[in-house]
Amino acid sequence: MYSPTRRNRNIGTENQGYGQNNKLTISSPYGDLKSFYERLAHYRKEIRLINNHEFIFVIEETRKNSIHSCSLNDIQKIIEQIPSKDYGGLKFIILRQPKRKEEILSPVWGRLIYSYEFENEYFPAVILDAIDTEKKIFWPKKQTVEDQREFERLKTDGHTFIDAKRNFIAEFKPEFTRNTQLYRTLPHEFGHYVHYLEVVERPRNDFEDEENYDEKEKRMDFYFSIPKSEKEKFAHAYADALKAKLIDENKIPFEPA
């Protein structure tokens, strides 16, 4: 029988969301098997039932000049619009305060964790990182095709870039970081999870009544072997489709709740 505590060997690697740039430079305390994004300091938690699915929101205390761009009510409004079949086993929504070193080495808007440990429970989690409003967004002038696409997405979110000597630079404005994390990052991470569900959880196999762990492990290995570009394409398509639908239905944008 499949046990969520028996983690796939990809957990903690770049396939899991642990970027290549970290290169072991974000250390773990000796004997601590938790990944850096699982080591929370001062936090509170709140349980919310959304479309009859229980989510646990974990809100880590922010340091001076850092903010959580999205409120719990904001996030709930978006999750309510995501089909409940796409929730799967996802349970944790983490609003996390990254360490300063992490902000330098692996800055992200958010990430999906397929097996996240919180208070001795293991479930998939979507993490949204707090934003340091004193920092700036630096975007390279030499861009790949995907860099160019993301640059246009950021500008659509409202971020205003100044043409500097080596980079394009924008300030972190709360209303624009909210646009990015609420209307794009959150659905994008759900998109990654739906991709995982379609490859790993949803396929039928010869074992109708009882899941065979080895078969599921093979599907997991296949999923984690999918190129990152293909995973990103799927997640972007999922998020774009949801955003377009909600705009068409006049459900977004909405005022902070």
Image (spheres, rainbow, N blue to C red):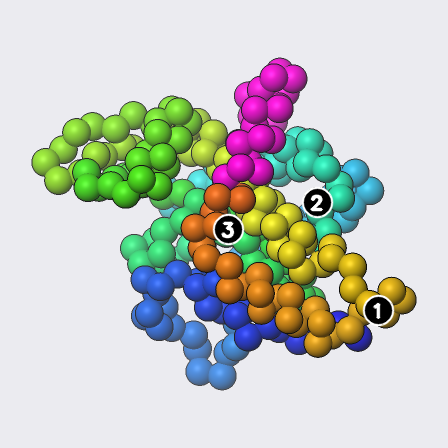
Q: How many marks?
A: 3
Q: Quadrant of the C terminus?
A: top right
What's the amino acid at mark 1?
Phe
Q: Is residue 224 left or right of residue 160?
A: right
SS of the residue at dot 2? helix
Q: Is residue 212 left or right of residue 5?
A: right
**Where residue 90 sits in the image (x, y, percent)?**
68, 53
Q: Position of residue 122 (x, y in %)?
A: 67, 66
Label 3 SS: helix
Q: Tell whether 238 sits left or right of 23.
A: right
Q: Mark 1 sits on what residue?
A: 207
Q: Check disc 2 and give the amino acid type.
A: Asp
- When the figure is inspected, residue 95 is found, relative to residue 10, above or below; the finding is above
Q: Nearer the viewer, residue 236 or 73?
A: 236
CA distance separating discs 1 and 2: 23 Å
Examine the structure image and report whether residue 94 is included in the region drawn in magenta: no
Q: Is residue 247 magenta?
A: yes
Q: Quadrant of residue 81?
A: top right
Q: Amino acid at mark 3?
A: Lys
Q: Are marks 1 and 2 in contact (CB under 8 Å)?
A: no
The extreme bottom residue here reads 31
Residue most extreme to the right: 209
Q: Residue at x 49, y 69 (%)?
A: 12
Can you see residue 73? no
- Provide the residue span drawn in magenta: 236-257
Does residue 7 appear anywhere in the picture?
yes
- Considering only vertical position in the picture, is 35 above or below 47? below
